[in-house]
Amino acid sequence: QGTRDHPPAHVALRDRLLAAVVACFKRHGAAAIDTPVLELRETLTGKYGEEAKLIYELQDQGGELLALRYDLTVPFARYLAMNKIANMKRYHVAKVYRRDNPATTRGRYREFYQCDFDIAGQFDPMIPDAECLKIVHEILSDLQLGDFLIKVNHRRILNGVFAVCGIPESKFVTVCSTVDKLDKLPWEEVRSEMVGEKGLSPEAADHIGEYVQLRGGLDLIERLLQDPKLSQNKLAKEGLGDMKLLFEYLTLFGIAGKISFDLSLARGLDYYTGVIFEAVLLQQENDHVEEPVSVGSVAGGGRYDGLVGMFDPKGRKVPCVGVSIGIERIFSILEQRMKASGEKVRTTETQVLVATPQKHFLAVRLKLISELWDAGIKAEMLYKKDPKLLKQLQYCEDTGIPLAAIVGEQELADGVVKLRDVATREEVRM
Amino acid sequence: QGTRDHPPAHVALRDRLLAAVVACFKRHGAAAIDTPVLELRETLTGKYGEEAKLIYELQDQGGELLALRYDLTVPFARYLAMNKIANMKRYHVAKVYRRDNPATTRGRYREFYQCDFDIAGQFDPMIPDAECLKIVHEILSDLQLGDFLIKVNHRRILNGVFAVCGIPESKFVTVCSTVDKLDKLPWEEVRSEMVGEKGLSPEAADHIGEYVQLRGGLDLIERLLQDPKLSQNKLAKEGLGDMKLLFEYLTLFGIAGKISFDLSLARGLDYYTGVIFEAVLLQQENDHVEEPVSVGSVAGGGRYDGLVGMFDPKGRKVPCVGVSIGIERIFSILEQRMKASGEKVRTTETQVLVATPQKHFLAVRLKLISELWDAGIKAEMLYKKDPKLLKQLQYCEDTGIPLAAIVGEQELADGVVKLRDVATREEVRM
């Protein structure tokens, strides 16, 4: 339940997407690592907050207590700590597992790919963070998904907001997860959760509401830096300083136009400590898709400076920032688009079918196809001793093979093959 | 335990191997499928004989009873049956899981890659079987692993041998698994297991011994076709007929010289019904490796005509033949060779480092690197505001980046960059 087989047309499209993503990661100088799908349960414990109940656990079979990985970030942090690595730019494309209620119509499954790029190490502020946003911009542009927006925020700015609104520090994380619902719920509902479930005073909630509904660019950053309360708060000042520097770098990258400083962005996971971001596709008016899928975010990430330290015996920290591309959601969108347009993906790459119009030519075909394979040419033949020519040409049309190399008595006598363009029916002897 | 993290140098080498294998599979017109790493336990039950105890089972968490896949063949058979597919040429490269005693020094792990190519469908005899052997030959040649041999046998020939030696049909499978040990144990020990554990008469065991120690080529097939006893046995005759046809096709493919008809080859798995094969590397005298690793077989496979029917409600059969490339063992060999030769794999593909000899050039570097990325060039820069030029060039040498694009005051004024070849120190302005 919640998993699926992927037929060739899926895999062909998915491989094309993954290739584009990986090409971008390599363009930015990342190396690949791979970690086991199995982790010790204790490695995953205490990293995912309430989501921990979705972890797939293996049966205790008299060995170690194991679980399936839940994401690629925690295994990466464990890897860095175990190997005492202080600097690394890595990517990892692999499947992760969540015992979630599958919403398969919205492209959510219990087994799905994650494509992560992360930069670990102590560097000058905001340079790696800006590169992560550049990567999101490059990939979403490359894949021609239509218009998009990358929302950014900063955990310290949020914490500063909470502080100046009089929220005790012990409630920052839980209030943060309520703010995170603002992309799906109207402010009124978020406010009533704050007051009811989270026990804030109505005044504090309203005060938070004034801030978290703000969005903008450099202008908003400047305004908040002048805000009489925020400018007095250390956390907020640091966060806003980071954000200003980030926008400077994003302007140099030429991508600031697609970035929105959005104070409602909070992101669920506990481990973020700095810049956080999330990319969303914008609704397209003249979209040819009949029923637009609601896909949510297609990429997200942020800075997590404390996670590696949780795996180090001495608590030695390695600052990290990373991005995860939501390849499954992007896949759902592209798949639906192709369905709507009637476009088909070829599932094989065969260049030529070795065919014959005559009986008793199996040996000749086997010799010819063997030569083609040895020359690196992608070739097929029908697995029949004496197939009909029509069947052979039909197979080319069905599977998209562009050429047929035909050999019969005449060709054999002349020492040639007849190469036929399946679409145009043009033939040349060679 | 028995799993491992793969650092960048591993992944880079492994990706190169996998690319060669997949290129071959595509050259032969295969399409890719993907199946979940989780299967229902019942799907795996009764397919692996005694090996079933090595299956990783998931905890019963109030849903379905699940296990991690043990190989890619059973999921493929389930896929064909579930989707009522009667014809398919597919490849699948993915990890499988076995709760085995890990022998990590011999390259055996509990999590490892399998690379499978299979042809499903009712076709004229031995054409797909011959192609599977051609694929093994192409891949082992491509990877330049040194000399190799592909042993082939046929389940029906083995069964025919057992029949003419007076073994009851009910003991065929168990005697077969004893014969399978002949590649590791001397005949005397295999014989004593037959007589002791398996309860054969000494005469029957000796009789079997006369056959299963035979190996050869077309000559041996012809001789056995004349064998007074075997020629009277229907199973043996069918198997030998197949084998003769197979050798004919392998000769047309030009690979018969690397094939050995070996009656000791039995292969453990129950589901094989026809041709079976296994590729082994031959010991090399002038091998530069100090301590040669014993790696066992590097590829294997065979025909399994009954497996799909086990998943079909009506028992409808789909004949299949396939091959699995032992990529992990090949990896171990190549890794050891590279260690011995001191050769290093680059773990990134970065073409150019954007560098500067001056302070306050971060903005210039960010603009330049952004242009390079947008032009599809693989580029990196140090994540420091004002790095020293020496450090930047050192980074190129450490990570194998061949070029540095240097921009300082003079270059900025002239509107050029200085492109430096890191190895030769040659520079051009452009």
Image: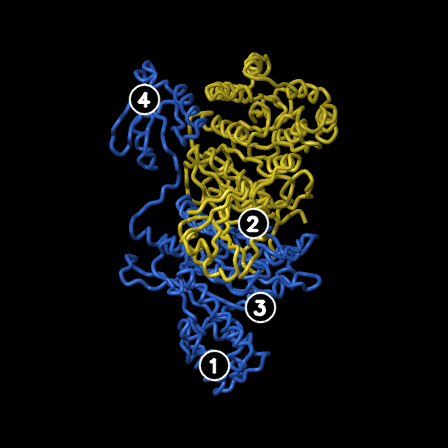
Chain colours: A yellow, B blue
Alpha carbon of mark 4 to alpha carbon of mark 1: how far?
A: 77 Å
Q: Number of numbered discs present?
A: 4
Label 4 or label 1, whichever comes before in sequence order: 1
Do tag 2 and tag 1 residues touch (Cβ < 8 Å)?
no
**Between A24 and A15, the one nearer to me in the picture:** A15
Whether labels 2 and 3 belong to a single chain: the reply is: no
- Looking at the rendered structure, the kind of residue marked 1 is Ile
Give coordinates of residue A2: x percent, y percent: 66, 47
Residue A393: mark in rendering:
2
Give coordinates of residue A311: x percent, y percent: 49, 42
In front: label 4 or label 2:
2
Label 4 or label 3, whichever comes before in sequence order: 3
| Residue indicated by mark 4 | B430
Q: Chain of mark 2?
A: A
Badge 4: residue crowd in 10 Å (few <14, some 14–19, many ≥20): few
Residue B49: mark in rendering:
3
Alpha carbon of mark 3 to alpha carbon of mark 1: how far?
A: 23 Å
Q: Secondary structure at mark 3?
A: helix
In front: label 3 or label 1:
1
Label 3 or label 1, whichever comes before in sequence order: 3
Q: Secondary structure at mark 1?
A: helix
| Residue indicated by mark 1 | B208
- Looking at the rendered structure, the kind of residue marked 2 is Leu
Q: Is residue B421 left or right of residue A80?
A: left
